[in-house]
Image: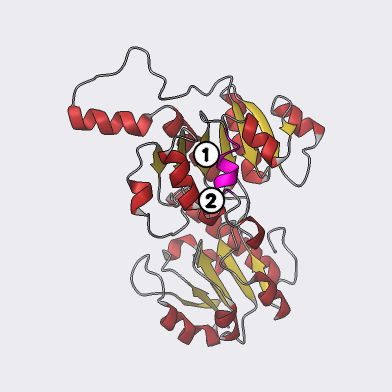
Amino acid sequence: MMTILFSHNIPEEYYREYTKDMKVIKPAEPLASWPREEIMKLLPEADILITIMDYPADREMIDAAPNLKVIGNQGSGTDKIAVSYAKEKGIAVVNAPRAVIDATSEMTVALMMAVCRGVVRYDRDLRRTRVMERPLYFDGDMALYNKTLGVVGMGRIGYEVARKAHGLGMKIIYTDMFELPEERAAALGGAEKMELDELLGAADVVTLHMPLTPENVHLFDESKFNLMKPTAYLVNAARGPIVEEKALVKALREHRIKGAALDVHEFEPNLSAEVAELDNIVVTPHCCTNLTSERVRLLHETLDGVSAVLRGEKPYNQL
């Protein structure tokens, strides 16, 4: 009998059909996760390890699991998993690249609209004053129609964000290693591929959609913010360290850019005081897929991949 080790206590009804013939190990408390010292003790008997989002599966953990055959991550990011090392050890790694698309792209657009239209500020001020005061002519916010969205990373999520934004009347430009096929670019109103620096100078909103790699840590530093329009906004629902927080705070304080919306943060799980004090930023706690319906979709996509590997197949979501 194989043993499947879950990093978190996931309700059994969400995975029961996948684990009928397996021994299941998970934390005792509902929704709790294993402390590192505890999971290290359990890894020697695991054939399958299932993690959620940023829970790690690093080299030390892999070395502690001599029977491990598959690592499954319930998310699209794998920066916390030692993928190359796992492959060297003959361990398959699968993730959930499709199930994240709808929820993450939807939340990205929600963040963009919240910061560009001042939703959070209006809510905060009205609760404080309880009087509906507003300037007759106000330049603090920006309407999105007829504006330009710059997508940095035109993968699955980036494309879906662009599709939704095009529906709002936005022009789409993008930067990526690959050029969109003609028909997909046409579906976005003729999306134009640009180099990053050119895109930064042209976009009214810049949205980030790329994996975290050593090459793009702090890709958005002071030099990149200096290329953006002073009326532009930054949205990051990818990974926190892609943006150098110190440089972003400076750009926002000095009004080098107009605003930002972040679902991810450089120093997760904590939010710095410097960011919290800014009034031209909207922040959420890395929660794009934080809905039961979406988390179950992520789990099932991951477990479908795991099941395929155990059958000797190579699923589309194996890295």
| Mark 1 vs 2, N-terminal side | 1
The reply to whether dot 1 and dot 2 touch (C-beta < 8 Å) is yes
Height in image: 19 above or below 181?
A: below
10 Å crowding of disc 1: few (<14), some (14-19), many (20+) = many
**The residue stretch that appears in magenta:** 220-228
Residue 211 shows up from this direction: yes
Q: What element does badge 2 sit on?
A: loop
Height in image: 167 above or below 287?
A: above
The label shown at residue 243 is 2
Q: In the rendering, at what x and y percent does residue 132 appear?
A: 23, 20
Image quadrant containing the N terminus = bottom right
Say how the picture is coloured: secondary structure
Residue 223 on the magenta segment = yes
Q: What element does badge 1 sit on?
A: strand
Q: In the rendering, at what x and y percent does residue 304 appear?
A: 63, 61
Residue 264 shows up from this direction: no
Q: Residue furthest right?
A: 182
- Residue at 40% of width from left, 44% of height from top? 283
Residue 169 figure quarter = top right
The label shown at residue 181 is none
Q: In the rendering, at what x and y percent does residue 262 appear?
A: 46, 45
Q: Residue furthest top?
A: 136
Height in image: 154 above or below 56?
A: above
The label shown at residue 234 is 1
Report, in whole angstroms, how far the alpha carbon at label 1 lies from the one at label 2: 10 Å
Image quadrant containing the C terminus = bottom right
**What amino acid is found at the position of numbered circle 2 in the picture?**
Val
Residue 250 on the magenta segment = no
